[in-house]
Image: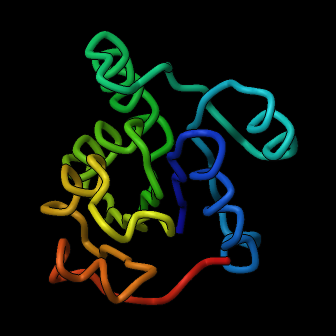
C-alpha cells in the first residue's frame, strides 16, 4: 500500500506525525508547505511542496489542483490521508478520480464548529475520522476514534 499524506505545515502536520507508529513501515510520500517546520520534520521523508498561502487563494488552489494531477498520476497512491487544511481539497477530489481511498481526520481543536476543509471533503471521504464525540453533530457518518495526542 502506498500512502499520500497531504497537509498544511504546523499543527496539521503534527497531527499526522502522531500516527508514525502506524505509517513508519509503509511506502509513503508527503505533500505540504515548504516551511521551516515541515523541512525539519520531514527531512528524511519523500516530500513534495505545494503552493501557499491557501486560505481563500484561488490562484494557489488552481496551482495545487494541477500539482495533484501531476503527483497522483506519477505516484499512484492507494490511500490519501489528511488532517487539513486547504491542500487536501484538490488532492482528495483528484485522488478519487484516480481511484484512491481518501481518509480525513478532523482536527482536535475544532469542537464548536466544523473546519471548511472538513465540510468540503466530507461528502467524498471513504473514512472521516473524528477526535471528539461532539463533532458527530457536523459529521454524522464520521467515526469517533478519540484524540491523536
Reply above or below: 40 against 14.
above
Residue 83 image offset from top left, x and y in percent: 47, 58
Q: How many marks?
A: 0
Q: Quick one: quadrant of the C terminus?
A: bottom right
Residue 107 image offset from top left, x and y in percent: 46, 64
Specify whether 103 is left or right of 125. right
Residue 36 image offset from top left, x and y in percent: 80, 28
Residue shown at 23%/82% (left/top)?
136
Q: Nearer the viewer, residue 117 or 70?
A: 117
Residue shown at 78%/46% (left/top)?
45
Reply above or below: 32 against 63.
below
The quarter of the picture where residue 9 lies is: top right
Specify whether 7 is left or right of 49. left
Q: Nearer the viewer, residue 106 or 123?
A: 106
Specify whether 128 is left or right of 76. left
Residue 55 image offset from top left, x and y in percent: 37, 26
Q: Nearer the viewer, residue 133 or 102?
A: 133
Residue shown at 33%/30% (left/top)?
69
Residue, far top:
59
Reply above or below: 32 against 18.
above
Q: How is the image coloured?
A: rainbow
Reply above or below: 61 against 112.
above
Residue shown at 67%/37% (left/top)?
47
Specify whether 29 is left or right of 90. right
Amino acid at each position: 500500500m502506498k500512502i499520500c499524506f497531504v497537509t498544511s505545515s504546523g499543527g496539521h502536520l503534527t497531527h499526522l506525525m502522531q500516527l508514525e507508529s502506524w505509517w513508519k513501515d509503509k511506502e509513503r510520500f508527503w505533500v505540504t508547505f515548504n516551511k521551516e517546520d515541515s523541512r525539519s520534520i520531514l527531512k528524511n521523508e519523500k516530500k513534495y511542496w505545494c503552493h501557499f498561502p491557501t486560505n481563500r487563494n484561488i490562484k494557489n488552489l488552481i496551482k495545487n489542483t494541477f500539482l495533484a494531477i501531476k503527483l497522483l498520476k506519477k505516484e499512484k497512491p492507494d490511500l490519501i490521508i489528511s488532517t487539513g487544511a486547504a491542500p487536501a481539497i484538490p488532492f482528495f477530489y483528484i485522488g478519487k478520480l484516480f481511484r484512491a481511498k481518501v481518509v480525513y481526520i478532523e482536527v482536535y481543536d475544532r469542537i464548536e464548529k466544523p473546519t471548511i476543509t472538513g465540510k468540503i471533503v466530507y461528502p467524498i471521504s471513504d473514512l472521516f475520522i473524528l477526535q471528539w464525540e461532539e463533532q458527530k453533530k457536523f459529521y454524522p457518518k464520521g467515526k469517533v476514534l478519540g484524540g491523536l495526542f
